[in-house]
């Protein structure tokens, strides 16, 4: 897809982070936007920024884990614009660091509902509209953690593995259609995903966020730029950040022994809410 001028681009989780940066950059490229977020205030702020850049924006506040809301969103966008050219399933959450065996089922179910089911709903609701276009793109944001496991983040890792698998299946199933399918795999991105964790353990969350920010080597703006370039070039796997590219190489070279390397660097029992 060489040009996004007048194309209709849908972005979930557009209230902050990568989603907001994607919205702003697509606005600058002349796209018409349909934006979602669960936070009405954050979504309104993104919408105003994009309108100041000259974009037409439709906004809708809902949780992507609500299937009926997603289907209503897709139909409303199609009715308003008459076309849908790009769908970006970006919305996602993180959890506090904790071992799987002590993670409450409620937290496991919540992250699966948003990170996995949200992508399933977004894909299934929008694919029929995308297939009507001469060229279109479905973009699912996974993570570099879709290629290797990381202790104390089991629920998050599980959902990101699921998104990558889903996306690769969709790519094969849509190979004869006009829809290109892209899996985005970011490394550490400087966003508020950790600070936005819904938890009573605020001190632990803030400490976790501080450590994460030091590790995050890529800004949301840089990530959005890489994603857009990847979609332009038709890249199937869009790795975002030097850390993501390095991790990808290591996993490819050492698929059976990376766990030993990781455990030398990471004390599983020294982190998380289990302690």
Image: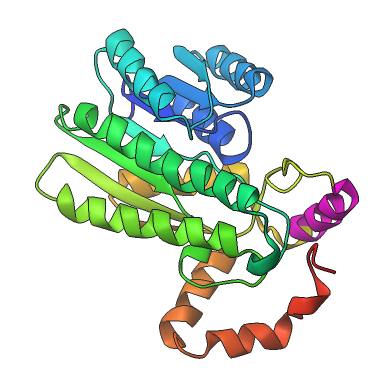
Percent of width and height locating residue 8: 33, 22
Residue 148 sits above or below residue 52 on the image: below
x, y (%) of residue 41? 68, 18
Front in this rendered view, residue 135 or 127: 127
Residue 186, image x and y in percent?
A: 53, 56
Q: Quadrant of residue 121?
A: top left
Can residue 3 be spotted in the picture? no
- Residue at 55% x, 43% y: name it: 92
**What quarter of the picture does the N terminus occupy?**
top left
Q: Which percent across, then down, holds residue 245?
A: 50, 68
In the image, the segment drawn in magenta is: 201-213
Direction from residue 213 to residue 114 in the image, left or right: left
On screen, residue 104 above or below 247: above
Q: What is the magenta segment's predominant secondary structure?
A: helix
Judged left or right of residue 93, residue 235 is: left
Residue 26 in sight here: yes
What quarter of the picture does the C terminus occupy? bottom right
Drawn side of residue 82 relative to residue 67, left or right: left
Is residue 202 highlighted in magenta? yes
How was this image coloured? rainbow
**Extreme residue toward the right, this view:** 203
Residue drawn at 39 percent across, 20 percent down: 73
Q: Is residue 123 left or right of residue 147?
A: left
Q: Residue furthest top?
A: 80
| Residue drawn at 65 percent across, 68 percent down | 101
């Amino acid at each position: 897809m060489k040009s996004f001028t007048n194309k209709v681009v849908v972005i979930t989780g557009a209230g902050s982070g990568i989603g907001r940066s994607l919205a702003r950059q697509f606005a600058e490229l002349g796209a018409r936007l349909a934006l979602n977020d669960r936070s009405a205030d954050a979504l309104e702020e993104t919408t105003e920024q994009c309108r100041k850049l000259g974009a037409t924006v439709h906004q809708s506040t809902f949780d992507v884990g609500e299937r009926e809301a997603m289907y209503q969103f897709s139909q409303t966008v199609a009715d308003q614009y008459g076309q849908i050219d790009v769908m970006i399933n970006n919305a996602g959450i993180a959890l506090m660091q904790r071992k799987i065996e002590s993670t409450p089922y409620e937290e496991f179910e919540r992250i699966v509902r948003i990170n996995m089911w949200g992508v399933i709903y977004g894909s299934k609701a929008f694919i029929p509209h995308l297939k009507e276009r001469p060229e279109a793109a479905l973009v699912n944001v996974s993570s570099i953690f879709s290629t290797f496991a990381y202790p104390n983040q089991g629920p998050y890792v599980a959902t990101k593995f699921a998104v990558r698998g889903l996306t690769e299946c969709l790519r094969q199933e849509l190979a004869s259609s006009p829809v290109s399918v892209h899996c985005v795999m970011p490394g550490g991105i400087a966003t508020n995903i950790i600070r936005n964790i819904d938890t009573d353990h605020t001190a632990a969350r803030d400490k976790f966020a501080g450590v994460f920010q030091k590790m995050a080597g890529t800004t949301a703006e840089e990530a959005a730029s890489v994603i857009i370039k990847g979609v332009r070039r038709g890249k199937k796997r869009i790795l975002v950040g030097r850390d993501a590219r390095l991790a990808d190489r290591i996993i490819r070279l050492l698929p059976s022994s990376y766990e030993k390397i990781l455990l030398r660097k990471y004390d599983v029992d020294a982190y998380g809410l289990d302690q």
